[in-house]
Amino acid sequence: MALILLAGALGLGAGLGVVILRQSVTALHSLLFGIPWGGHLSDGFSLDWWTVVLVPSLGGLVVGGAAWYIKRRRPRETIDAIEANALYGGRMSLTDSVNLAILTVLSGGCGASVGLEAAYTQIGAGFCSNIGHRLRLRRDDLRTLVGCGAAAAIAAAFDAPLTGAFYAYELIIGNYSIANLAPVLMAALAGTFTARELLGEDLAFATSRAVHVTTTDYLMFVPVGLAAAALGMAVMQGVTATEQWMRRQAIPPWVRPPIGGLVVGIIALIYPRVLGSGHGGIVANLHFTFALPYLSGLVAAKIAASAISIGVGFRGGLFSSSLFLGTLFGGAVVMALNSVAPSMDPDPLVYTLVGMGAVGAAIVGAPITMILLVLESTRDFAATVGVTVGVIAANVAVRRWFGYSFATWRFHLRGLKIQGAEDIGWIDSLTIGRIMRRDGKTVPTEMSVAAMRKAFPLGGVPQLFATEGGRLVGTIDPADLWSPDLGGIPEEVSAGDLMVPIAAWLLATDNLQSSLKKFSEHKLEILPVIDGPDNLQLLGYLTEAEALKSYSQELERHRSDMIGEARLFSTAITPES
């Protein structure tokens, strides 16, 4: 119950952070581009050509300079929510999170073609992680709080609590369980209500009518999903290619954003809707129909602008950009079908929604999240079923052909074998025998509490291990020896009366990953290390704190080994956390 209440309170803070960041970007758009308050760059406003070209370039100079300064002061890479839960037990730096959010606001504010959801989730998850660490929560609870922060942020951003919650389950926590159900949902609801109270209720992509779907349409959604998967993979590869090219040219990191901003500005002279995250463009695509040549050109322009923006070092992600691309792609499919098979008479709205969900699932890697986003935004069940077909096809295709979402692709290119928030796969060579403590204290089961008090003063040892015939049979918390609730007199109560039977143990040949899993599964902070399940001879013990410390040290060694190597995704890339 305490964790649920804490998650709700922190969800309020994460929702407030989203409102502040969103309003900051809106203010920058109004100041730099003259956009009316509440408008979006991708709404297609008529802007002066020099504004379109110069603002992204000069803004890139500011972003590059700020990133250089932050990197000099804090040379380590920023840990996002997925990496924190996969590798660090939920530990994130609030300072680094704030710095990343500032860079993302500057990037989005000057018109870079990036999504702001990266900043939202980073600040929400970082805030919750910081509070959880200060409260000294256990590793599992801390990981849950990181998911709560991300859930509240996404829920507040899209006015969609279920979307936010399942974003956390799929990408940040990595699983859905009864234990994390209530805290994550509570945080998502709190974030949603905070944004509604401050900004008013605003369904992200509300539609004005119900969709019309036929059996033929459902069959068509499968190839649409497959094509969306190919489009998503092209976007991810485009980001990689951009950064590779920049590295080959040996261009200093702080110079790359202004160059990229200039290129994005030139693209925007022809297709102004590529500027910004794409929220305004999504709404326009849902309500209006555009010609096929225009949609096809805008798809290519948005892919190029997003790949260039992220590849050169603008901070942000691809969440909202993928949704915008999906609506463009869905609209293009409708126009193509009208040309080759006019008798089908496809509904433009449902194909636009299917394209949005399918491309979003292909890039972000959260299929249930995309389905729920459509359901909560449109409140149209028929549309949601159609989107489900397209999302499933896209998700299966990406997993089969590519194997990564945008977030895990970034980790792959850095040499980390992370397939998701639960994956701690690469660190499997560090065995328990190398890091365990060998000074475990054993007591026979017949030893009295009085004798144990004399042998082991309060605070002297972290754990006692009860043995019978030399075999390990249980554990004793030394604090229980001094408990005022001790039943019986100390001379008559034995170790066998106090011990807790062995529920789990480690072998010296086990690796660190398996030990962390056992700590989590059994809710224990100390585990004995034995020679084997047959003899049960105590060799030593391992604490969860020591396991996590060794984990961090091995990770830092691994990362240090990569210094000087060409990292395709360095500080420039941030997933939609």
Image (tube, rainbow, N blue to C red):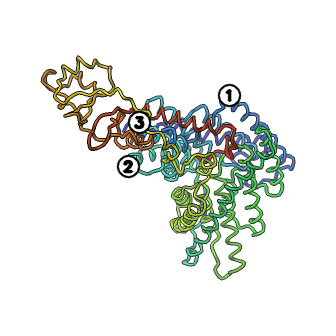
Choose top left, top right, bottom left or bottom right for residue 493.
top left
First of labels 3, 2 by sequence position: 2
Q: CA distance from mark 1 to mark 2?
A: 42 Å
Q: Residue at position x 74%, y 38% from top? A: 63
Residue 73's label in the rendered image is: 1
Q: Is residue 93 above or below residue 56?
A: above
Label 2: element kind: helix
* Amino acid type of the residue tagged 3 in the rendering: Gly
First of labels 3, 1 by sequence position: 1
Q: CA distance from mark 3 to mark 2?
A: 34 Å
Residue bearing the label numbered 2: 178
Residue 193, position as x, y percentages in the image: 51, 44
Q: Residue at position x 34%, y 41% from top? A: 522
Residue sticking out furthest to the right: 50
Residue bearing the label numbered 3: 433
Residue 523, position as x, y percentages in the image: 35, 39
Choose top left, top right, bottom left or bottom right for residue 370.
bottom right
* Amino acid type of the residue tagged 2 in the rendering: Ile
